[in-house]
Image: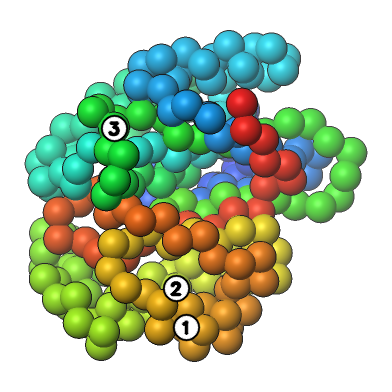
Amino acid sequence: MSTCVVFEKGGYRYLPAVFQYSSGVAAEPGFEIERVRLAEPLALAEGFGFVERHLKGLGRPSTAFAACELRSAAPFSEQGFHDFNREYVKTLARWGIYRDEVNPVARTNVCPEYGKPTQPVLYACSYTLPTNKSRGRFIVAGDGEVRGGTGSFRSRTVRFGETSPDAMREKARHVIAEMEGRLKALGFSWRDAVSTQVYTVQDIGALVGPELAARGAAAGGVAWHFARPPVEGLEFEMDVRGAARELVL
């Protein structure tokens, strides 16, 4: 697991990952993380406009933008996902966040099975605010059952193309272990999680008890979003949040 890097202009630290997102963020001392979910998700360009206005109204710079949650119409091909991300990071570059293939912003991007948007939309965003409280807060980015390293998604995916109960258990164990590793690297554990999210259209009922609740990952419950991960062939994704506040606007 990577070592955290401090993004001073944002008031948070992050776990480096790929160019389109980090593996997670945590507020630095003197800051906390606030999350806003949009009651009506906005097309990405409009959503970024909302973020700019909202941060300005709070007296915060655009660099305070720490994490976002997107919803897309359907899983992308690998090339399609790459192309989408190249467009996505242009706004972050304009805001002074993304530079030289380094992106501190955490992200979850999933595809609802029902009520699909016609285009990628902003579902929620998180940012830092100054605080005099000592408690730390974090957002762990979404991740599916893809192993690290080089090669295609297909070659690195746990039990690619399989959705049997045994295959889903193996996929879930891989992702849960990744969540635990990220939490630890950011300085937290499951005890600090305010909410745990799972994204899949496969039946995971039998996994919630032994694989999540039994290891302390469901103290605040488990939110099951009936959605697919953003790349074709993936079946199970998770993220974990510990924001100081969560609002719906």
Q: Nearer the viewer, mark 2 or mark 1?
A: 1
Secondary structure beneath disc 3? loop
- The residue pinned by badge 1 equals 211
Look at label 3 and name its amino acid: Pro
The image quarter containing residue 72 is top left
Look at label 2 and name its amino acid: Ile
State the CA–CA distance, disc 2 to disc 1.
8 Å
Give whichever of discs 2 and 1 has the lower sequence position.
2
- The residue pinned by badge 2 equals 176
Secondary structure beneath disc 1? helix
34 and 226: which is toward the camera: 226
Left/right placement of residue 124 relative to residue 227 reads right
**Is the residue under label 3 in contact with that under label 1 (CB below 8 Å)?**
no
Q: Position of residue 194 (x, y in %)?
A: 67, 58
92 and 201: which is toward the camera: 201
Q: Position of residue 229 (x, y in %)?
A: 28, 54
State the CA–CA distance, disc 1 to disc 3.
31 Å
- Residue ID at (14%, 72%): 160
145 and 120: which is toward the camera: 120
Look at label 1 and name its amino acid: Glu
**Is the residue under label 1 in contact with that under label 2 (CB below 8 Å)?**
yes
- The residue pinned by badge 3 equals 117
**Is the residue under label 3 in contact with that under label 2 (CB below 8 Å)?**
no
Secondary structure beneath disc 2? helix
**Residue found at the very far right of the displayed protein:** 132
- Residue ID at (29%, 32%): 117
Above or below, 163 against 185 in this view is below
The image quarter containing residue 27 is top right
The N terminus is located in which quarter? Answer: bottom left
Q: Position of residue 73 (x, y in %)?
A: 23, 37
State the CA–CA distance, disc 2 to disc 3.
28 Å
